[in-house]
Amino acid sequence: DAMVIQNPRYQVTQFGKPVTLSCSQTLNHNVMYWYQQKSSQAPKLLFHYYDKDFNNEADTPDNFQSRRPNTSFCFLDIRSPGLGDAAMYLCATSRDGDRGPQVRYFGPGTRLTVL
Amino acid sequence: SQKIEQNSEALNIQEGKTATLTCNYTNYSPAYLQWYRQDPGRGPVFLLLIRENEKEKRKERLKVTFDTTLKQSLFHITASQPADSATYLCAHSGSARQLTFGSGTQLTVLP
């Protein structure tokens, strides 16, 4: 089945130690998103890629970076994680070019713990 | 800026009853509203989408309404089951790639 895969499902890192989360998709969608979700809060968009074009949200801290080496893969890099970065990180895809709104297809998420 | 608000409290209902969840938005009417289900520790899963010129949309036991006068969407689950227990997220989109989520309503269906 076509899907969005995130690895690892659980990641523990130390304060200030760089960490990379990965996302892959078999849907062949041209748009990939990274969301941050804290407990009982709405998913918050960090940035997205439209093909190779990177689109950063205005309030996303510089501590968060992303790479998309090809259509299928996208990475979230947190350069110096702080305690406030502990959250669920969700990768999602959509297919631009469809008429109307783009439904998001989410991966299972990576739960990040910062010690 | 656009705000989207959902029932902030958890909703508990008895099995077999109809669950009704509310999504309110401010300012302009979104072109579309989407509803997602999220289970604990999992990513959201798309359920239904309704356009601003549609009053109602149905899918099996699910029904969504859209009232642009009240700036509100209602999400109904009829004949609810314990397996319907989850958090339900409302999201509005004014354009193709814009999508803003509410914080969700946690539904518990009691057997």
Image (cartoon, rainbow, N blue to C red):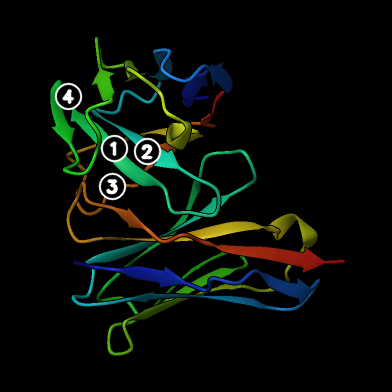
Between discs 2 and 3, the one toward the N terminus: 2
Are discs 1 and 3 less than 8 Å apart at CB?
no
Dot 1 falls on a residue whose secondary structure is strand
Q: Is residue A3 above or below residue A19?
A: below
Q: Which of B30/A1 is in front?
A: B30
Q: Quadrant of residue B11?
A: bottom right
Q: What's the distance in space between the residues labelled 1 and 2, CA to CA?
A: 5 Å
Q: Is residue B69 above or below residue A46?
A: below
Q: Which of A7/B82 is in front?
A: A7
Q: What's the distance in space between the residues labelled 1 and 3, CA to CA?
A: 17 Å
Q: Which mark is residue A51?
A: 4
Q: Which mark is residue A35?
A: 2
Q: Classify mark 4: residues with Cα within 10 Å, few (<14), some (14-19) or many (20+).
A: some
Q: Which mark is residue A102?
A: 3
Q: What's the distance in space between the residues labelled 3 and 4, CA to CA?
A: 15 Å
- Which circle, 1 or 3, is nearer the viewer? 1
Between discs 1 and 4, the one toward the N terminus: 1
Are discs 3 and 4 less than 8 Å apart at CB?
no
Q: What's the distance in space between the residues labelled 1 and 4, CA to CA?
A: 16 Å
Say yes or no: labels 2 and 3 on the same chain. Answer: yes
Q: Which of A43/B62 is in front?
A: A43
- Residue labelled with disc 1: A46
Q: Quadrant of residue A50?
A: top left
User: Mark 4 — on which chain does it sit?
Assistant: A
